[in-house]
Image (cartoon, helix red, strand yellow):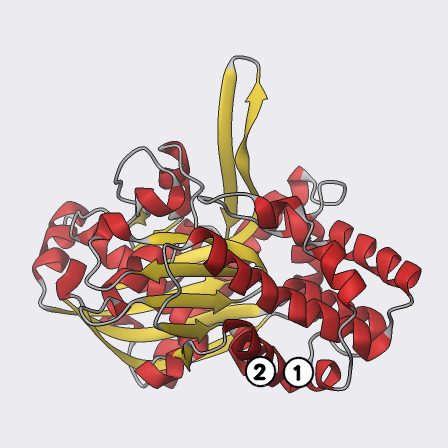
Amino acid sequence: MDPIEELVKLRRKKRKTAIGLMSGTSADGVSAVLVEVEGNWIDTKFKIIGYKTYTYPQEVRRKIFELFKPETGTVDKICAMNFVLGKIFAEAALKIAEECGISIKEVDFIASHGQTIHHLPGKNRIGKYEVKSTLQIGEPSVIAYETGVLTIADFRPKDVAAGGEGAPISAYADYVIFRSSEISRAIQNIGGIANVTYLPRNAEISEVIAFDTGPGNMLIDAMVKYVTGGKLRYDVNGEIAANGRVSEELLNWLMEHPFIRRRPPKTTGREEFGEKFALKVIEKAREYGVEGANLVATVTRYTTKTIAESYRKYLPKMPDEVIVGGGGSHNKTLMRMLKEELGEVKILTHEDFGIPAQAKEPLVMVILANEVIHGHFNNIPNATGASKKVIMGKIVFGS
């Protein structure tokens, strides 16, 4: 079939079977979800068939982390890993289909976010050109070739081209899924970086506010790795933090970070809260005599305090409900601290709405890709700072 005719036929199909693929800031692995989706825009309906996170092999994860640092992320490594991750993402798509008992030939499209390796939301001048930029790898042409399925990927750049920050990318899907005519909601993701989508009661799309609130698990994970000598990569259930005491002195220093005081729209990543900042935190902790569980407890409180302070400073009012997703929602100490910071605000999780935490981000990719198929915008300029609504995503036809 002519590929354009294939795309038109797909648009007209009432119910589509799709696979969403996502690798986040923590680069733990590829999260995959298999979904049935109907309609689009505010008429979107979906049913999650299955989901799973496929952990990266240790060598691959080490290579990905090399790409995060300019001194080790050389062009030859980026070039090779773009295709390696394309194969790994394709394998994840094939596996999730097989494990759900569905032939890959029954899948209508694959939606892939890729792996962000660098994000520069501030303007950089090179010669006469002044640009914002972002880079996600995991070559979609490889995914399409290996699976034979139409693949839609690389969503962020179009918003950045329109002057936006390309993030938070989930704001559009949050509006589609969680808007309410009765209450206001904050959809709070706590992944490596934490970001919020604020939906006023009975919100129009132009009223949505979304931005990164600061570090999520990234700084916590770094301190856990430090205090355990590399034996642990994250604080399981928040058990280490639960046995520590927060250092107000170190916490106050952390809250002075300029990103926390920056007004939205704003996004961040490893460039601001990665390894270099973690080393500064360790140095300052030594100066204040903060160590072990106390250090982990302090940075855990930091994540929750930056979230709460962001609500107070940058939202028109405190939300009636906060819906928490991402890996942070499984950290019991973090969730307890968030409740303490937010007081009477009701706190729920994505699971309360039938969306497993592991499935949410790849589900977002499916919703965004579905809008591409329907020729409908899928960014929120009010959230990203883009000059106008655009269709984010590049289409690669199957083999």
300 on left or right of 141: right
Examine the image and state in which quarter residue 34 appears: bottom left
Foreground tag (1 vs 2)? 2
Count of numbered badges drawn on the protein? 2
The numbered dot on residue 336 is 2
Residue 307 is at least partly visible in this image: yes
Which residue is at 70% across, 87% downward? 239
Where is mark 1, residue-wise? 238
Report crowding for label 2: few under 14, some 14 to 19, many 20 or more residues within 10 A (C-alpha).
Answer: some
Residue 185, image x, y percentages = 33, 68
Instruction: From the top left corner, tell me how far across and down residue 244 is, in percent.
Output: 78, 81
Identify the residue at image location x=69%, y=79%: 235
Residue drawn at x 51%, y 57% as measured from the top left = 310
Q: Is residue 257 above or below residue 107?
A: above
Residue 216 visible in image:
no
Query: Where is 218 relative to 116, above or below?
Result: below
Q: Nearer the viewer, residue 61 or 319?
A: 319
Residue drawn 57% across the image and 14% down it = 127
